[in-house]
Amino acid sequence: MNRLLIADLKRMWRQGLAIPLLLACGIALFVMSNSSVRSVENTRNRYYQQYRFADVFAGLVRAPQSLGNRIAEIPGVQRAQTRIVRDVLLDIDDMVEPASCRLVSIETDDPSPMNAVYLTRGSFPRDPDRSEVILSELFAEAHQLLPGDTIDCIMGGRKQTLRIVGVGLSPEYVYVVQPGLMLTDNRRYGVAWMPRRQMEAAFNMEGAFNYVSIQLQPHANTEEVIARLDRLTKPFGGTGAYAREDQESHLRVADEMSQMKTMAFVMPTIFLAVSGFLFNIVFTRLINQQTEQIATLRAFGYRPSEVGWHYVKMVLLLVGIGSAIGCLAGMRMSWWLTDAYIRFFRFPTIDYEFATRYAVIAILSAAAAAIAGTFAAIRKAVSLQPAVAMRPPAPRDYHGLWAERTGLSRWLSPVARMVVRRLETNRLSTTLSVLGMALGVAIVVLGSFFEDTIDYVVSFQFDKSQRQDVNLTFVETLSPSAVHDMQHLPGVSQVQPYRSAPVKLRHGRRTERLALMGLDEVPQLYRILDDQEKQVTFPVREGLTLSEKLAETLDVRTGDRVTVEVLDRRQFVKEMLVAKVFPNFSGPAAYLNRQQLHQLLQEGEQYSGAFLSVDPARLDQLYEEVKQTPTIAGVTDQSAARAAFDEAISESTSIMRVVYAVFSIGIALGVMYNCAIIILAERARDLATLRVMGFRRREVSMVLLSELAVITLLSLPIGLPIGYAFAYLTTVALDTDTQRFPLVIQPSTYAYATVIIVAGASLSALYVRRMLNSLDLVSVLKVKE
Amino acid sequence: MSTTKRGEKRTKVLFRATGVTKVYQMGEVEVHALRGVDLELYAGEFVVILGASGSGKSTLLNILGGLDVPTGGTVVFRDHRLTGADEDQLTEYRREHVGFVFQFYNLISSLTALENVALVADIAQNALAPREALRLVGLGERCDHYPAQLSGGEQQRVAIARAIGKRPDVLLCDEPTGALDVRTGVVVLEAISRINQELGTLTAVITHNAAIAAMADRVIHLSDGQISNIDTNDVRVQAKELVW
């Protein structure tokens, strides 16, 4: 029997090659995605541990150093590290607009500081008489700055020159993102680490601090520590302590990773399922072709179980080959993908991991899918009476076929009738081919729809929703008169000031820290749109308007009441009504009419920032002015932000897009190749007959090609909706706490899938045509049907 | 009458084979299927090529029909040199001049009898009307039947009708009665003989059944890849008189 197994495999090597490759595609993708997610996660965890990423963080306005000692005495605290953190504007030679930078103090004499800086170039600052800094790597790279270079900084209204002595990374700023922006912009926002003494001098903070990080003892109660810490920092303008889980960089990295995980799970799972299913289809047809051989074996006296085992071995062998190729390819590609992710995130070292567990899952599920699918065919084969199986199949009656009833046949040439009738009488085999190819179409749609979705989100965000050219954030809140002056900045045609306040919203046991935005009733520049692109308005006295994501997080509905804890130096609590919940495509967000927010904060008109509409020709002048304005802490150029967003998105998704595109095309090709080979096998006799009769090669291949063409055409209207369904499943799976993706598939994506499939079908057809040309006419015809 | 006819036929040579050899490479073994065959076939004659299994008769037929090319020697059909022709030239040759009938009919199962014949009419220049071709083999009434609805003998006659549908110059039959019982075999041979006489098509039938030889003008005995003997029948026996 083993010899037969080898003979069978040799005979069907063409299919035998395509089937495991199909499976290998699914397994490789699954293994690759999960391995790289595991690798990135490991890398991050080790980085956090080695560089002592803190567990709890708290910001305040200004506190004496002695408070730091009291914080260190809180039960559960291992150690506390006080720091000075300030946002400043940088004037960089290669940029017209100012860049924003977060200056963070470091203790140069502490051998094992928390949130330690990993130097990738240069050295730590040594000269106490000069303003020396370490610059974050991505920012340094974006401006091609190296140790020894200098940058101008506007500190406390004074221009000061900083000397770069090192370039580095920190677990606290793995993902550096400017407050208020969706994604990182390495050109316009960076981090610089500066010795504490220099920072104290520059910001008049001698003996004081405004930031504290805490390392907890093992098993410490984080909630308890945060509560005590809040009580201690409150008198000093504490804005509320938060755990690592809420730390900005960590949150973003975790978010990105959970998205990666979902992506690593959903799409590859669909791919794996599809390839398993295709494996089924192909194998079922293969066994159906072998009915006679099975009968012969049975006639020789082989037991059904022995025949069954023969085919199970064949399945397992093919699964084995597919798994081996899939795992090896998956491992190789996961290194490559991990490297790409790590270039994006920046970690000092890489810990590769091969997701053995996932590989085992993939192989087992592939084997299970294959055996389950082939079981029916094997059982049918095993249960055949030898005499029945060796008899030719019952003649088919072609009367009463659809093509005959409708009279279509009368208009067709005999060759066309052959095609139509065969497709119709071999319904099962036609259906399986159409279904297989439809899945190929669907996979291509799945592999490429995400681009449309991202495009939509970008256009939603930047074209429809946020129509300002520039966003200014202020160091401290400003009065209306100061904002009024902004009208006179160069090129400014419209100003929309806003107020935002750090708050903690609480409903029952659920809480969320965020910036509560106070906006005009009908904002003109910075508009909030729901998922139907309708503008959300904020009438006075209506109450809070929450995004659906936030409402879900807090488990509130319109009409519920939530507790609003204001986290600036005033520190008070108030209950408020949820007036409206609207569905949107971004994360948790809360809005209030601006006047109402002023009332809530018990203040007059005070603004945290302003959105500006600016004449593009005069942006340069505007930035020149802004750089001289000490009250401005940050500037966001909308078109630059968009460009950065596009770049970041294309950087983070392009790899996966390419991978999915390649794999989906591979799977589609595999299906079509198989389809074509099976058709050729089933039709070899008819086609050889035509050749003998004097039909030219071109004419004979038309029979085969038109059959493939019909199957391809039938598969498109079925495959495109399945692709839509796959895409829908993906967006549902990607619907996380912080993000929701709309399901947008452009006609061009459907067109792309169609082109790929048609091209793939043509390629396979050409290949089969070559095989057809080398068909041994004589031997095909000499065999009894 | 047949004698005079045969005299006319002899004047026109359709095939001239000279020193034809065919060697197949079967793994490491060389199989000499034909070992130098010299042969002339004439327009309109009925030839039976007789030989045991493995004598090379099928190989010879395939070479004459343009399905295979010899290893050595030359085969000329009228002014076409079949030796050295490429695949496309052989296709054109089969298309214009050759009709094949095989042991296992090789009908297209999804086409009716009429459609199977019409298939050829589509590619031939001077085709018989498909119904006329079926009438010639005595199946005028069964045009709309599918192969599965016909008996073996009927299927073979459809195959003959299909082969002659394009009015070929030569009709090559490889064991046409091999899968049939005597009675149906006779009907099929009658049809072949009728075609030969009514259309004047050169007909070559290969068989291992010596009984069939009696209905031929000439009988070519093939053994071990060589022509051992050629008999000429003075009188052609009618198919229905054959006994085996």
Image (cartoon, rainbow, N blue to C red):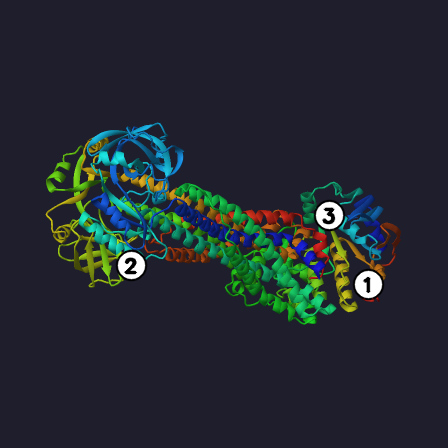
Q: Position of residue B44 (x, y in %)?
A: 78, 52
Amino acid beneath label 2 = Thr
Could you tell which of marks 3 and 1 lies nearer the N-terminus?
3
Label ID, residue B238:
1
Foreground: disc 2 or disc 1: 2
Disc 3 on helix, strand or loop?
A: loop
Please state the horizontal and vertical placement of residue A105, each as a whole percent of the image. Answer: 29, 39
Q: Is residue B142 visible?
A: yes
Gap between marks 2 and 1 measured at Cα: 98 Å
Chain of the residue on which disc 2 is drawn: A
Residue A781: image x %, image y %?
71, 56
Residue on which the image places disc 3: B66
Left/right placement of residue A200 relative to residue A709 reads: left
Residue under the image location 79 percent in, 68 percent down: B182
The quarter of the picture where the C terminus of chain B appears is bottom right
State which quarter of the image contains the N terminus of chain B.
bottom right
Residue A553, disc: 2
Mark linked to residue B228: none
Q: Is residue A728 above or below residue A662?
A: below
